Image: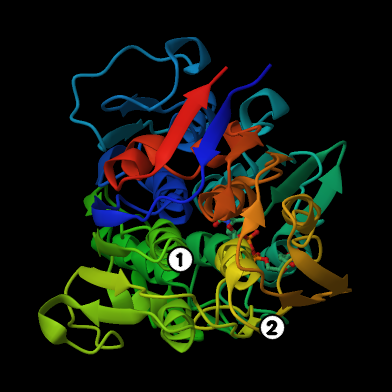
Amino acid sequence: MSERFLVAGGARLDGEVHVAGAKNSVLKLMAAALLAEGTTTITNCPEILDVPLMAEVLRGLGCEVEVGGDLGVPPGDRPAGAPSELPAGTVRISVPTRLSSSADFAAVGKLRASVCVLGPLMGRCRSARVALPGGDAIGSRPLDMHQAGLRALGADMSIEHGAVVGSAQTLTGAHIVLEFPSVGATENIMMAAVLANGRTVIDNAAREPEIADLADMLVQMGARVEGGGTSTLTIDGVPELHPTEHRTVGDRMVAGTWAYAAAITRGTVTVRGVQPHLLSSPLERLAGAGASVTAEGGADIRDGAAGESFTVEMTGRPRGVDFITLPYPGFPTDLQPMAFALAAVAEGSSFVTENVFEARFRFVEELIRMGADVRTDGHFAAIQGREQLSSAPVWASDIRAGAGLVLAGLAADGQTEVNEVWHIDRGYPHFVEDLVALGAKVERVG
Ligand code: EPU
């Protein structure tokens, strides 16, 4: 039986928690290292299983990769690779002159994000074959925009025998308008375009802070990228890039999870390691629910210069508020399950609209098993808050759903058993340890 968490409801979270680098940045930064021969070092990496899994993908392409520190996973589950002397949170990638351009299913099957090697392989090798992982609990996640963007640069792209396959004689800059600001498509097109001939403009680009982080690293590697973090990216191709050292941006989803956990347990939590303005929308929603949210030194939480910490305090029962998920800077779909958990115990009703992933309401069934009063219709959900949820055995279906269920368990009577927690381990380093340090009664068993 896989591991599970036993979550005792009723404790108030109180204290400080430090958040490491973002999963959804570090995996792309590791892929970007492929763009330059030599040794690139990435710091502030989270100790989650996805990092060594990505290291395996890069090894399969011919790189040597060292991952520092304890990965937060049992040794038996640890992917191959000698123990490293690098400090925790540091990854060192040595990229050879000639890369293999084929990532097979054995390497990528465990890690959906590995599709982000597509752009760097096209940029560097002008060819790529990246196996596609299977179905996903949050939606179908097609790659049409990734392929259309690379085609606009002159590549032949197709899906063949379970892999996305690309080849090009040359890549030439183009004006690309994305039909939706897809994070993955923006990243793959940007990483191919940095080594294309001439200028590429990506309009309606995703604006997520992780894209700005990737653009910053590419610039440090010698790329000419302007507009990272805005909806227009301008990239002037260069013949080659050089390796670099880069610090991963803090994980706003982990930080946001702590913020919602504080509010749900009517506690006080100071979150360090993430600039609050990167969470403006979810923190403003929390303020609407009655929480006090303060940035370091009393700065405005929307101020980009506000430092890397903030405090959430909730006294009394949260009020119901509405949530509409949207690409950044809108409310993130990755915090939607946490919003649900809050709404489930809030006073009054809340309305949630999911606009990004079609199947992200799947976990709602689990919340209903805990007594939540929820009705869904397509991508809309209406929630009538209850004073308390009722503990039950529940199953995590993806990283964020799992974290949302743990938060719901903190606000339930008795002991909630959250199963399939390997999902949570993929995104939340030291989750149980941090919860316990904040005063929760949570245990990992199995
Ligand atoms: N889409 C298409 N065609 C494409 C690309 C995307 O239809 O070619 C659709 C997707 O199916 C989805 C929507 O566009 O409905 C948005 O997808 P996007 O490409 O923006 O997301 P992603 O790159 O696949 C990343 C994160 C997700 C996060 C989303 C949205 C990584 C590894 N994953 O996914 O994170 O939810 O952006 O912000 O960066 C998570 O961390 O739990 C997670 C799922």
* Amino acid identity at mark 2: Ser
Q: Name the residue rendered at 41%, 79% in the picture.
A: 283
Q: Residue at x 42, y 75 (%)?
A: 316
Which corner quadrant of the image does residue 94 belong to? Answer: top left
Which marked residue is nearer to the observer: mark 2 or mark 1? Answer: 2
Residue bearing the label numbered 2: 349
Question: Badge 1: few (under 14), some or many (20 or more) residues near its Cα, within 10 Å?
Answer: many
Whether residue 101 is visible to the viewer of this picture, yes or no, is no
Quick check: 160 above or below 329? above
Residue carrying label 1: 260
Q: Amino acid at mark 1?
A: Tyr
**Which residue is outermost to the left?**
297
* Residue 321 image point, x, y percent: 59, 85
**Nearer-the-camera pick, 248 or 20:** 20
Against 193, residue 174 (above or below) is: below
Q: Give the structural element (helix, strand or loop) at label 2.
A: strand
